[in-house]
Image (tube, grey):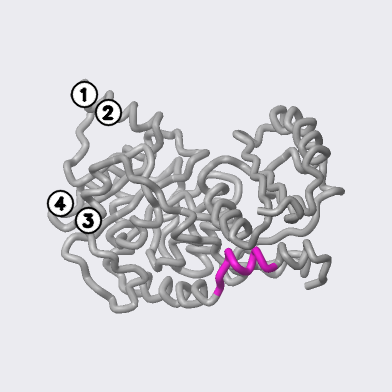
Amino acid sequence: MEDSAKKVLIFGLSSFGHLNPIACLVSELINRNYKVINYGEERCLVKIAHDYVPFMLNEINIENPDLIIYDQYLLSVKYLQKILKKKSNTNKDLQPKKELFDASFNFVGCCLSTEARATELKDEKINILLNNFETINPNFGFIKPRIKLIYVSLGTIFYYDLSVFQRIIEGFSQLEKENFKMVIACGRVNLEKLNEMVSKGDYVIPDNILLSEFAPQIEILKRASLFITHAGMNSTSETIHFGVPVNCIPVKCDQPLCAFRFIDDLKLGVRLDPLEFTVNDIKDSMEKVLNDQTYLDRILKMTKISRQYDGVKNGANIIEKLLDKNKF
């Protein structure tokens, strides 16, 4: 890359739901010969955000970037907004309360790149599972797999309530075992707790459930019949892109609003309260979405809309126009 290449600094959060779309965008910008430096802040707490500001200012002064991109949930940029530029977002058809967003917001679509998101799978059990399930999504041919795969991921920030995973496991165990397989990405802390409970004989994990600290979400969504999700914007965008109906268990931040849009407005699944849902509630919600064809029909309509957008290229095009000082 030439030294004269224009430079972009990105300040974001390091959790997967925030990092994944940025990684795809970074890959595209590098392919277009821009120099990109991406910073990830571990947490969004006020004190840490305040302490992060001097570092950000120092990096800006040293690197002298042509453009700065920031995550809207990064509190530290609230102190720096006067030097930051435009805002961009997701597919406008998915955006909650889209009528409240003015022309300064650019809706680029799902930022997903198979190449940028390629992951070396070190969990042999995950590899075996992926090999045993056919890639069916988006399922426009309405293929009915003999064994349906259910994927559970509640994000990488607010996923520490072990009881939520326990209720999901216990609800799933009431389904007909031979017809279903479940993959649960529960994070390191919960995985260790569950394994310890099992080793002590205090808890039983059905053998058609695979627990993992981390799971390759894109590869699983290509094969899944149902996604039990926290309804973060990244996960909801990806499940629409692959046409997988949902059970939403939102916790905080953007999740309740995304879940409301997904369930109440678009009717793409069932929404559950993380503190109040019971084992029977999650069992019934899984059966409802899996057995009612209209959920799949509706999400596939949204899939067709999603695939009209190329979020990575659209986002990179907007950045190029900003760097060239052109107006939209």
Q: Which residue does the numbered mark 3 point to in the structure image?
A: 131
Element class at badge 1: helix
Q: Which quarter of the picture shows residue 248?
A: bottom left
Badge 1 or badge 4: first in the primary sequence: 4
Within 10 Å of disc 4 (Cα), the crowding (few <14, some 14-19, many 20+) is some
* Residue type, label 4: Lys
Q: Residues within 10 Å of mark 1 (few under 14, many from 20)?
A: few
Distance between the Cα atoms at labels 4 and 3? 20 Å
Q: Are marks 2 and 4 in contact (CB under 8 Å)?
A: no
Point 21% across, 23% down: residue: 199
Would residue 240 appear left or right of 175 to someone viewing this image? right
Query: Between tags 1 and 3, which lies in front?
Result: 3
Q: Which region is colored magenta? A: 309-317
Q: Which kind of residue does numbered mark 2 sit on?
A: Asn
Q: Mark 1 highlights which residue?
A: 199
Q: Quadrant of the C terminus?
A: bottom right
- Which residue bears the numbered disc 2? 195
Question: What number is the disc on residue 29?
Answer: none
Q: Is residue 264 left or right of residue 101?
A: left
- Residue type at mark 1 is Ser
Q: Residues within 10 Å of mark 2 (few under 14, many from 20)?
A: some
Mark 3: which amino acid? Answer: Asn
Residues at circles 4 and 3 in contact by the CB criterion of under 8 Å: no
Question: Looking at the rendered structure, which numbered label has been put on residue 177?
Answer: 4
Asked whether 12 or 120 is in front, the reply is 120
Membership of 319 in magenta stretch: no
**Residue furthest to the right:** 82
Residue drawn at 52 percent across, 51 percent down: 20
Mark 3 or mark 2, earlier in chain = 3
Foreground pick, 171 / 49: 49
Q: Are marks 1 and 2 in contact (CB under 8 Å)?
A: yes
Give the percent coordinates (x, y) of residue 123.
Answer: 29, 40
